[in-house]
Amino acid sequence: MAEAFDAIVLGAGAAGLMCAARAGQRGRRVLVLERAEKPGKKILISGGGRCNFTNIGAGPANYLSANPHFAKSALARYTARDFLELVESHGIAWHEKTLGQLFCDGSAKQIVAMLLDECAKGDVEIRCGEEVVSVEQDDGFTVTTQSGTCRAPSLVIATGGPSIPKMGATGYAYELARQFGLKIVEPRPALVPLTLGGEEVLFRDISGVSAPVATSAGKARFAEAALFTHRGLSGPAILQASSYWRPGEPLFIDFLPEESGDFLLQAKRETPRATLRGWLRDRLPARLADILAERLGLEVEFGNAPDKALRAAGERLKRWTFQPNGTEGFAKAEVTVGGIATAELSSKTMAAKRVPGLYAIGEAVDVTGWLGGYNFQWAWASGVAAGEAL
């Protein structure tokens, strides 16, 4: 006979544990089923093992979704400050890095331990190493794993997206959603390095070189570091832009975000004996400066260069066009853009509108944050929204 619970949460990641803890502390009998051998595997590797657990500035503008308004409700009701209070109540020391990113002083293990503590307060049962064999719906949900069957009137899909498959990530959330007739927004890798081919392979020669730039893809622009790799482009500025980039589109890099106007004409007036290569070397890593100067082909001293040529070179340096030939895929993607369509869900409770008792939270849903703690904040906020409704 099937064991009975009030709610079954599939997935012991950030969103699943947060949801289970909140529901358990509200008196619900909650079971969490996790395929991996231990909970919170993605949390443990995040932020270089220190877990960038939220971003103090997190708001709806920092998220991509087919419906940009969907995330507003959950994010407003459970904020980064709320999560920070929880972190502090567990005595976890933290620090702020650039751009509002908050990290543990110690280890990401502290965040997992905190979530497990919160689950324990609500008598949540967590079973790891459980492979779901089938999920059936009648007047509730019956979940069968290799070790038995359990039932509950509510089921929460918190199994994440397919990014980082070596951590055990799969597209199971989408299979389950389709089983219940929920639409899926086409998933694609996000926060992922981009690859270069053709003539741009030349830039692979400076693999390992990093520089502060501003990147643009679509209408989005990010001023952070870019890193040249043996396959193409990476670094925070590129990862951010990759979420907005679509195959076939160009990516633009401003190599001199501090400069404006006709800056090379000004340089000509101030230092007529300087060359473009030398001038760039004062502002950028030498190998990058050399490759840009080479591509621009302006080898004469500024004083001997036509104004038109200097103006054109300046414009290119401010908006250098790359034509990536792809991404490094889900294997290297930190998160997934797309997922269970928000049109199918209540923005207040994360409940499926057409399937009573079914919920979807976290990365499984078509809400994707920027790099820098935003995806964790969505996990906490959507988890709390569902946990309050169960």
Image: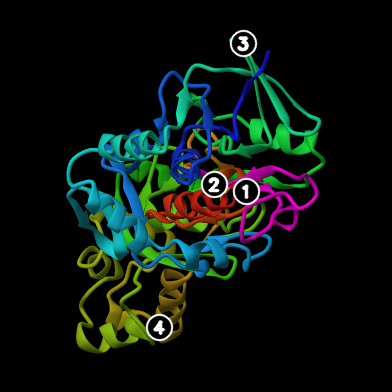
Q: Quadrant of residue 385?
A: bottom right
Name above or below for residue 93 compared with residue 78. above
Callout 4 amino acid: Pro
Q: Position of residue 101 (x, y in %)?
A: 31, 58
Mark 3 surroundings within 10 Å by alpha-carbon count, few (fewer than 14), some (14 through 19), many (20 or more): few
Question: To which residue does mark 1 refer?
Answer: 365
Choose top left, top right, bottom left or bottom right for residue 96. Answer: bottom left
Front: mark 3 or 1: 3
The answer to whether the residues at label 4 and label 1 have Cβ atoms under 8 Å apart is no
Q: Of the residues under marks 4 and 3, which one precedes in the sequence?
A: 3
Closer to viewer: mark 4 or mark 2: 2
Amino acid on which the number 1 mark rests in the picture? Val
Q: Kindly state the secondary structure of the residue where label 1 is placed.
A: loop
Tell me, yes or no, whether the highlighted magenta stretch contains residue 355.
Answer: yes
Residue in front for this viewpoint, 33 or 5: 5
Query: What residue range appears in magenta?
Result: 335-362
What amino acid is at disc 2? Gly
Q: What residue does disc 3 label?
A: 146
Quick check: can you spot residue 293? no
Report the residue marked by disc 4: 306
Which residue is at 68% across, 60% downward? 66
Q: Which residue corresponds to mark 2?
A: 362
Nearest to viewer (mark 2 / mark 3): 3
Position in image of residue 359 (x %, y %): 65, 45
